[in-house]
Amino acid sequence: MIERYREFLPISPATPIISLGEGSTPLIYSRRLSERIGRGCDVFVKNEGVNPTGSFKDRGMTVAVSKAMERGTRALICASTGNTSASAAAYAARAGISCVVILPAGKIATGKLLQAFAYGAKIVAVNGNFDDALRIVRELGETGDFTIVNSINPDRIAGQKTAAFEIVDELGDAPDFHLLPVGNAGNITAYWAGYREYFARERSTKLPSMLGFQAAGAAPIFHDYIIDKPETIASAIRIGNPASWKQARAAIVESRGAIDVVSDEKILAAQSWLAQHEGIFVEPASAASIAGVFKWCDSDDAAYSFQKIPEGSRIVCTVTGHGLKDPDVIIRRMKELKPVAATMTDVRRAIGM
Ligand code: AN7
């Protein structure tokens, strides 16, 4: 990915490139989403779940770890709701350095925690939430022993903006609306920086409106106050005090966009809908952008009338992480599967058709 967009990244000939083949992810035209939204809108899904560790974090991590290696770092550190730690652990392994991850105990989706173990990170679970973990990481970062690879590291944001470049390169211009989930707000900051940079270089003729979606129980930017005990099924975005709060506000205001909330129920419904209508299986946090496009466009949601997204708009929804990372909700459904006798009759009866 760094090679493709080298001229836009803080990379010099002296930077050792630490890559796992991230980026260049599919931008999928969704016929069924476009049909459901109607009114001549075209909806595309940018599937970041197919990155090497299964999330968009790899775009930022390749740049952050390459720069850390250039500076001679021996160890990375991050706080995480799961995906940052999975990505940091993988890129640290690739670079041959150590990685410490500070996680809120009991709050990490199964697949993500499993990744941190598999890649050999030093894992510390703290009794607290993500915001507590990030506070400790900031303090440890000041000792000079570690490079922080949370999105407060500007190299992370620089890497993540390449997703916006890819979208413009593929569509031939920027979309009219870009929807994405918001947790720490690093990604909305990165996309907006990417779109602005391409526009300034005349690679696009317009800028999209950025629409960010927080989970209803973890929506500090929407409410404009810190949430002490954020709660949502979408554990990736269970964040009460986002690190890039100000930058997210700026992106929303400058792009004439908005920040909005979606309920856990709508998030899970959107996750199932996307898997069952388009074959794209994403984690709950990622489905916030799909729940968002439904909320803003569905005719039965009167509060969000058609006027907000005009006819014929081009809409891109980023889905940020792979569904296999966070299987717990679906595992409950799997337990209902009861075996039948291995005969034609019994199997036909079980199929019901
Ligand atoms: C799947 O891994 O914060 O608004 O520590 O994993 O840039 O924070 C993850 C965030 C959206 C929100 N979707 O992005 C972490 C972490 C998924 C995520 C977000 C995250 P930001």
Image (cartoon, rainbow, N blue to C red):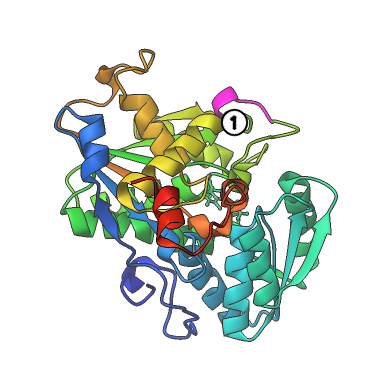
Residue 207 shows in the view: no
Residue 245 spot, x, y in % from top left: 57, 38
Q: Amino acid at mark 1?
A: Ala
**Chain part drawn in magenta:** 219-226
Residue 177 spot, x, y in % from top left: 29, 37
Residue 101 shows in the view: yes
- Report the residue marked by disc 1: 219
Disc 1, SS = loop
Residue furthest right as drawn: 127
Q: Residue at x 31, y 24 (%)?
A: 298
The answer to whether residue 345 is left or right of residue 298 is: right
Q: How many marks?
A: 1
Residue 333 spot, x, y in % from top left: 57, 46
Q: Is mark 1 within 8 Å of ligand 1?
A: no
The answer to whether residue 141 is left or right of residue 254 is: right
Look at the image and say whether residue 222 sits in the magenta stretch. yes
Q: Is residue 189 above or below residue 212?
A: below
Locate the N terminus by quadrant.
bottom left
